[in-house]
Amino acid sequence: MAIYGVALLAACYIVGIFLGDVFGALVGVKANVGGVGFAMLFLILLSNKGIDEGWLDSKAQSGIAFWSAMYIPIVVAMSSIQNVVAALKGGPLAIGSGVVGVAVAFALVPVIGKLFGKKEVK
């Protein structure tokens, strides 16, 4: 049942983790920076492309939907091991980067909506 689509999920995860390690090395951090986020972005893009082009069957789609539903609890569990107190004590950079990231994301919502939004047909 849910085993369908796991190969695509695993491939996206491996590529995402690799890119997160590369990005971490580029910014001078000995950690994975954004690997799971990259993986989920690739999964969304590839699964939408597979549905549109017809190479992703319905069983694989349901398997990907299952693992997508599991994503939030997994990320919550992963973030619980992070040392948030040390990050906050380390300076305002952690808070500032979070605030800037959220502000940029909110600002881009209307732009993305205009670029990729569906046109109303009257």
Image (spheres, rainbow, N blue to C red):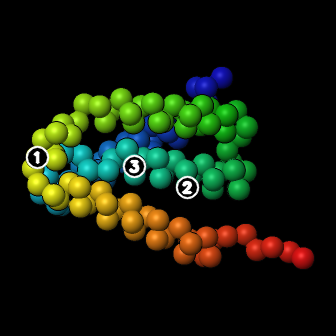
Question: How far is mark 1 from mark 2, CA to CA?
Answer: 37 Å
Q: Is residue 5 visible?
A: no
Report the number of numbered marks: 3
Residue 69 picture quarter = top right
Query: Height in image: 109 above or below 89?
Result: below
Q: Is residue 88 visible?
A: yes
Disc assigned to residue 37 = 3
Circle 2: element type = helix
Q: Who comes first in sequence, dot 1 or dot 2?
A: 2
Q: Which residue is mark 1?
A: 89
Residue in the image at 73% along x and 37% along y: 58
Q: Which residue is mark 2?
A: 45
Circle 1: element type = helix
Badge 3 density bin: few <14, some 14–19, many ≥20, Cα 10 Å: some
Residue in the image at 54% along x and 75% along y: 111
Circle 3: element type = helix
Tell me the kind of residue under disc 1: Lys
Do the residues under discs 1 and 3 have CB atoms within 8 angstroms?
Answer: no
Query: Of residues 113 and 85, which is closer to you in this image?
Result: 85
Left of 76 or right of it: where is 64? right
Query: Of residues 24 and 76, which is closer to you in this image?
Result: 76
Do the residues under discs 2 and 3 have CB atoms within 8 angstroms?
Answer: no
Tell me the kind of residue under disc 2: Leu
Image coords of residue 97 (percent x, y): 26, 60
